[in-house]
Image (cartoon, rainbow, N blue to C red):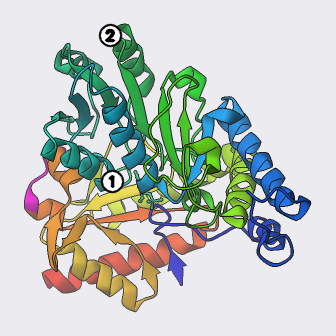
Amino acid sequence: MIYVDNAATTKIDSDVLAGMMPYLRENYGNASSIYSFGQKAHKAIEVARNQFAEALNVQSNEIIFASCGSEGNTWAIQGVAQLMQSKGQHIITSAIEHHSVLNACRTLQAQGYNVTYLPVDCYGMVAPKDVEKAIRPETILISIMYANNEIGTIQPLKDIADIVHNHGILVHTDAVQAVGHIPVDIKDLNVDLLTASAHKFHGPKGVGIIYTKNGIVLPPLISGGHQEGGRRGGTENTAGIVGAGLAIQKSMHELPNMADNLRVLSAHLISRIREELPIIKLNGHHVQRLPGIVSLSLPNMDGEALLLQLDLKDICVSTGSACNSGQLDPSHVLLATGIPIELANGTIRISFGKYNTLDEINPIVDAICTAYKKSNRC
Ligand code: PLP
């Protein structure tokens, strides 16, 4: 199998898995129990919290563990809305956010909040001046993703945060695709809230990581026990959190080399496919982009059919479409960049990870070309 859908999820790193196992089998105590068996689990969670604090350049008490990136985004947006409702009810986000952000905003709209969805340019970039223009006296939050999951474009987040902070407004970023893939220094980025997800950087599924700057106390999304300092109820997923901590630590160590390797793989794929199919369009920004995501649009091609042809050859990729009530809708991200619906429907996303190798490129290119030629009878 050639797995090139690492933006969807990644294979767990074997060191990470090995580090988790004792917390599933031997040290399975409840981290909230006060006897020492439970405290072993508690200590392991605090180690993971420190690993994230160090990797992201924040204080460890600013890191909260949850179940996934979607929960983190929902909590950050709805939590700020609830916390700041007496100040105002206006939120600014972008048209290309992940559905967990868009749906959290839509839920708030149904409750009477106003949301501005900023447009992007043809590279999927939000203009900082558009953010400033959209600010109103009642604006309470700006939520702009750090890097896009479909086209890989990296936003000018620091510029946006600097502008927004001049107006005394909070900034949240969905950094699910960025953390573990590009350096993320939260102090330098100047954001107030950030979301990450362990399964995107070779950690386990089921662990979301949320940074909230000291002083911002969001009402819990899940109220229950006093876990996570009363900020997120639910028995801690000790093994998952331990794995997440190990995964971020390892990613930080591997990041410079890994990013270089991913860039080489992406560049090789793009040049090989352009040789064979010059009509292909590369989506996203050409420089400000994640090293491993390549979004390609093929005219006169159905992305879903292409995906299935690749699947027959054991190659895993994504399309630029989202399944909605059994129907395929063209991606809101691609449409926001201004590409026509037909081209959006003919899009696939290839996303490399640290286990991919250069010798996988030719079979991918060959499979795409064969499927394209078959479909276009050339
Ligand atoms: N945000 C982005 C940009 C994503 O790509 C994803 C997952 O694909 C999420 C949020 C949701 O993360 P999770 O799968 O951990 O809920």
In percent of the image, x 35 and y 13: which residue is there? 163
Q: CA distance from mark 1 to mark 2?
A: 26 Å
Label 1 belongs to which residue? 100
- Residue 206 appears in the picture as rendered: yes
Q: Residue at x 20, y 39 (%)?
A: 122
Horizontal side, residue 193 vs residue 227: left or right: left
Q: Is residue 288 visible?
A: no
Q: Amino acid at mark 2?
A: His
Mark 1 vs ligand 1: CB below 8 Å = yes
Q: Main secondary structure of the magenta part?
A: loop
User: For residue 11, which quarter of the picture?
Assistant: bottom right
Q: Secondary structure at mark 2?
A: loop
Q: Amino acid at mark 1?
A: Ser
Specify the farthest residue to the bottom. Answer: 312
Query: Which residue is at the front of the view, 274 or 86?
Result: 86
Residue nearest the viewer, comparing 121 with 81? 81
Which residue is rendered at x = 35% and y = 70% of the image? 318
Report whether 127 appears left or right of 52. left
Disc 1 crowd rating (10 Å Cα; few below 14, some 14-19, many 20+) is some
Residue situated in front as seen by the camera: 284 or 119: 119
Label 1 SS: helix
Picture coordinates of residue 239, whole percent (x, y): 72, 66
Residue 7: mark in rendering: none
Horizontally, is 88 left or right of 6 in the view?
A: left
Residue 174 vertical placement versus 130 (above, below): below
Residue 139: % across, % down: 24, 21
Q: Position of residue 315 (x, y in %)?
A: 45, 81
Q: Do the numbered discs 1 and 2 sit on residues whose CB atoms are within 8 Å?
A: no
Which region of the structure is painted magenta?
A: 337-341
Judging by the rendered image, the residue that carries numbered circle 2 is 167
**Residue sitting at 50 percent across and 26 percent down?**
216
